[in-house]
Amino acid sequence: MVFYIIPLILSIYISFTPLHDWRVDKYMFDLSNPLQNYQDLFYLVTHDPDTWKVVLTTIVFTFVTLAINVFGGLGLALAAYLMEERISTFYRTLWLLPRMTPIAVYSLLWYYFFHGSAQGILNNILRMLGLVDEPIGWGTDPRVLPWGAWMVIIYVNGLVGVSFGMVIFYSAFRSLPRERVIAARVDGATTLQLVRYILIPSIRWHLVFVTVWQLLSLLTTYAHIFLLVEWNLVDRWWSTTWALFVFNTAFTGVLNQGLAAAAATILVIIGVCLGLITLKLLGYQRMMVEPRGEL
């Protein structure tokens, strides 16, 4: 816990200082204008086109990937549960591979798939089908920006999140009493009715947990996108999320640690609010489930 709390407190403190270029001796204890970094950050978001690209990319990436992760994971979990006898353990385990594969290896595989040269796997497939004449730089070609860069980072991160959601939802379905499902089948319920009126309502709190957890994870996504940007697979600004913007501001380019700390603090505030919402919802669930004592 110490390794989280101390850096968090230090980061919040730095956000009130003009620290830049790592001049700790000169700026670390300067609190003459504590809100300057937040004012500068607001100005960048509202006036700087590149920073606005970061905000827009973060919004699109977060909510589109969130929808894919939650609904994709739920769909796969339903398929695995309803066709449990026909789907082997091997195929259920196969969906865990994106999450179990090291980040660098996983990103490198998709780097070759989306590569903008004629050697790129996707470009080769499209050329063989006669759909394109020239190779397309999916994350860098102006003809397909910004959606090309968004497609790459959403797809690469989406598979990881889908596998996580599938594991949680499938475990939730397996914990349900089989008698309830069998009784519904005996009463003539169709698969759609079974899913809509029994299975989904029974795991609604798992849905809340996965949605909020994935949202927090996506807001802080860094490694996959960083590797794709460093390998020049995607356009820098149209693939920079808020977490990567914090890193770039602190360690590359302007080297403004105070501004980066302010941006990180905003991200922490959003995360804390989402966490409190989750705790409140889960606490409400326990209150509704736990039996009350008699008066």
Image (cartoon, rainbow, N blue to C red):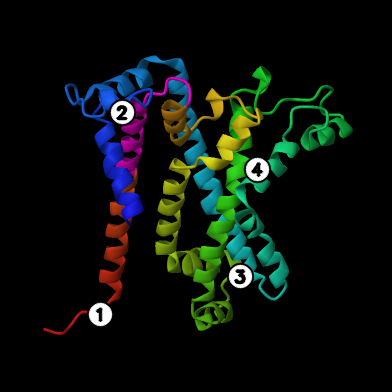
Amino acid beneath label 1: Pro
* Chain part drawn in magenta: 252-270
Q: Position of residue 106 (x, y in %)?
A: 66, 47
Camera-nearest label, 1 or 2: 2
Nearest to N terminus: mark 4 or mark 3: 3
User: Mark 1 and mark 2: span between their CA atoms?
Assistant: 57 Å
Q: CA distance from mark 2 to mark 4?
A: 35 Å
Q: What residue sits right under mark 4 in the picture?
A: 107
Give the residue at mark 2.
Answer: 24
Q: Position of residue 32 (x, y in %)?
A: 16, 22
Residue situated in front as seen by the camera: 193 or 134: 134
Quarter that holds the N terminus: bottom left
Task: Residue under label 1, please give it.
Answer: 291
* Rendering quarter of residue 193: bottom right
Q: For the residues carrying marks 2 and 4, which lies nearer the camera in this image?
A: 2
Question: Comparing marks 2 and 3, which lies closer to the viewer?
Answer: 2
Residue at image location 41% in from the left, 47% down from the top = 216
Residue 92 visible? The answer is yes
Mark before the other along the chain sequence, 3 or 1? 3
Residue nearest the observer in this picture, 27 or 144: 27
SS class of the residue under badge 1?
loop
The residue carrying mark 3 is: 81
- Mark 4 near mark 1, Cβ–Cβ under 8 Å? no
